[in-house]
Image: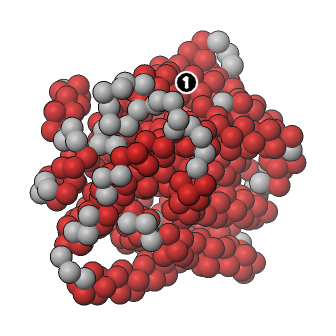
Amino acid sequence: MYLCILKLIGMTVQKTPTALGTEKIGKLLMQYAIPAIIAMTASSLYNMVDSIFIGHGVGAMAISGLALTFPLMNLAAAFGSLVGVGAATLVSVKLGQKDYDTAQRVLGNVLVLNIIIGLAFTVVTLMFLDPILYFFGGSDATVGYARDYMVVILLGNVVTHLYLGLNAVLRSAGHPQKAMYATIATVVINTILDPVFIYGFGWGIQGAAIATITAQVIALAWQFKLFSNKEELLHFHKGIFRLKKKIVADSLAIGMAPFLMNLAACFIVILINQGLQHHGGDLAIGAFGIVNRLVFLFVMIVMGLNQGMQPIAGYNYGAKQYLRVTKVLKITIYAATIVTTAGFLMGMLIPKLAVSIFTTHQELVDISAKGLRIVVMFFPIVGFQMVTSNFFQSIGMASKAIFLSISRQVLILIPCLLILPRYYGQLGVWISMPISDLTASLIAGTMLWWQFRQFRKKPV
């Protein structure tokens, strides 16, 4: 049945990007968002699978060690999104403007930039890995697990950057179903290899990391095959790999919003881990790791909706079809709100059942369940805030996207994490998150209302 659904999706997606300007918005969003949602959900399950096998196969302290790696993973994702997301948006806009030559060169520049940035990040991080992990809230009981996992992940960092960057371009070039297949392939391969490497070979937490990189290598090889096809509108060929100043600058400017968002997320997780370590110990950090994985599932579904919206909004904004831009935004907001409300209901009604998927350690289950219920307190409005931020990024309004990206995390959440734990201890760490969700959504609503007014003033 699952294969039938994938086949149906592959048949319904338009083969050419020009359909973005003519097809019905609702139908387009389904065609582009459903593959992206499946892909992003699979990506979330990809991370959850590691945590589940590590929690049951290695132990509670290993989950806490894995949680220490979140800031580094966010930092790596920040540099990856700086190139990949910015380039994908630029490709959508250039295709909308029918500037195919520039779109080709963007593809080549993505490849080169990801290699350069990925290598630099790996070398610098490996040099200071242990001090970094202790700074992130690690202890002698957890740093060993985190180190074993991150060394493997860092050695494969270039592969990860290339895989994510090319997948973003593939989606924006009119092939969302192929981008979905690449992500699903990594999940399936990782799920198969995890128990083999962790239990069968006895590699423990390193086995989970090796499974992750191996799956990405296989997916990357398939992506290279797709982009080597000369019949595709965007494909590898001589002359597109030389870095162009304007392409690099435009890509980095647009990608700066998700970069800053992930950079802020890195710093925030550091503060969360440090606060939980100080007020709750290693198990509290492990609890946040579990809560983060569960919440991430719903966040990734919304990100899938955003990825489906991005090429539609970018293309039509480039083509000056503002009514279509407005319509796709509204539909995406409605869908995202439904998703985050489902996360809210899970956290409020069955928190212990949800967290017990990862561990049978009773104290860890109790701390995680309590934290989950607090974190999802204002979750129904998180979808709106995420879509609004991504919307400005999709139409190339980098400064607005950057502001919305940093408003929740830098302007609100960081001060809360610095102040509230001093008065409320571990509870202060947990309640900082829903407070920032509420405040950031109010800011996003104000900015979106103003932008809607501007669209109504422009000629159709």
Q: Is residue 292 visible?
A: no
**Location of residue 322 in the rendering, given as x and y in whole percent from the top left corner:** 24, 72
Helix, strand or loop under label 1: helix
In this orientation, which residue lies closer to the viewer: 37 or 355? Answer: 37
Farthest top residue in view: 200
Q: Quadrant of residue 43?
A: top left
363 to the left or right of 95? right
Seen from the viewer's position, the closer of residues 221 and 442 is 221
* Amino acid at dot 1: Val
Q: Residue at x 33, y 60 (%)?
A: 314
Q: How is the image coloured?
A: secondary structure
Q: Does 126 appear above or below 405?
A: above
**Residue on which the image places disc 1:** 217
The image shows residue 259, relative to residue 400, as above or below, that is above
Answer with the quarter of the image where residue 256 lies: bottom right
Q: Residue sitting at 25 percent across and 87 percent down? A: 457
Q: Mark 1 packing: few (<14 Cα in 10 Å), some, or many (20+)?
A: some
Quarter holding the C terminus is: bottom left
Residue 168 position within the rendered picture, expressed as x and y whole percent measured from the top left: 43, 44
- The answer to which of 227 and 187 lies nearer the viewer is 227
Residue visible at 34% across and 43% down in the picture:
173
The percent position of residue 196, horizontal first and vertical second, equals 56, 15
Q: Residue at x 43, y 42 (%)?
A: 104
**The N terminus sits in image quarter:** top left
